[in-house]
Amino acid sequence: MIKTNYILTEVLTQALEKMAFLTVGPVDEEMTVPDQTVLAQMSFTGPKNGTIQILAGTEFAELLARNIGALDQADEENGYDALKELCNVTCGLLLPAMACSQKDVFDVTVPKVEPSGKAPKWEQFIEQPDCIVSNVEGYAVASRLIMKD
Amino acid sequence: MAIDILIVDDSSLTRKAIRRILDMIGLDIGQTREAENGKEALQILEQTPVDLVLADLNMPEMGGIEMIYRMRGNEATKDIPVVVVSTESSTTRIEGLLSDGAKDYLHKPFTPEELKAVITRTLGSLKR
């Protein structure tokens, strides 16, 4: 689990930097912990099977949308779209890192979002043992890689 | 001659980001149209032919692979080049896409230079 968590942290950092020009720093006490959360997730099947989940605040999701789309303002829907795309790109970077060969083929689902109000609460989500918390420019973002047998 | 492009991606932000990059890479871009999935793209292409399609693979309703397959089976769209813009990394699947009719492949996330290079390469190869 330590190895897959390390890979997830690496690829999430890469995805944020490349697609949204956002940097990941050390986790600290001053990060903004979300009240209203949004969950994006997608699953993959193939040589390895699992699900990636990313939980963040609506405020962070809107920042992500502004950066991806170079928007002056972003709304809630833009934020959901941005978090789904982050999940998609993260998964795209993760699978080759976990594959045995570049020829390995994975099938992926379309990323889905659980909007604010339906997404898990922050405290509940981060209590799970395989959850990673990242500090993305002052915003706390949680991610999980759930592997299936 | 200006290049008319159809962007096919279920993410409206990605479509916006591609449009923005197309505006800044110094190519002569004409009309840019957008579709949310392969089905919508085929409907647009029936009405309005374009010079190039930039298409994601993983989309609801109709993904990029089925869209390319249907384009190739239609006399009106069979020669329109499609560049797949996706997070897919498997060489097996990318080779499959290219042999099934995609003209080129661009891995997400990409830089403006990479997008410019793939468009120039694709349209350049058609002129030869």
Image (cartoon, coloured by chain):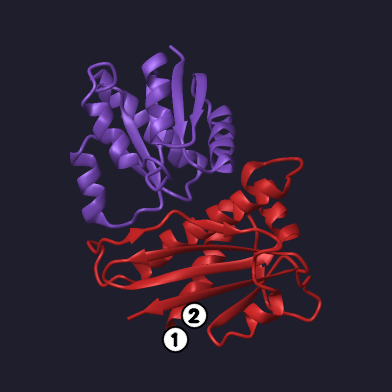
Q: Residue A121, image x and y in percent?
A: 69, 74
Q: Is residue A111 shown above or below A122? A: above
Can residue A18 be seen in this snapshot?
A: no
Within 10 Å of the Cα at label 2, are there few (<14), some (14-19), or many (20+) other Cα atoms? some
Circle 1: residue type = Met
Query: What quarter of the picture does the N terminus of chain A occupy?
Result: bottom left
Q: Residue at x 45, y 24 (%)?
A: B5
Say which element carries label 2: helix
Q: Chain of mark 2?
A: A
Q: Residue at x 44, y 41 (%)?
A: B114
Q: Is residue A99 shown above or below B61? A: below
Q: Which mark is residue A5?
A: 2
Q: Which residue is mark 1?
A: A1
Q: Which chain is purple?
A: B
Say which element carries label 1: loop
Q: Is residue A6 left or right of residue B103?
A: right
Q: Are marks 2 and 1 in contact (CB under 8 Å)?
A: yes
Q: Is residue B92 shown above or below A119? A: above
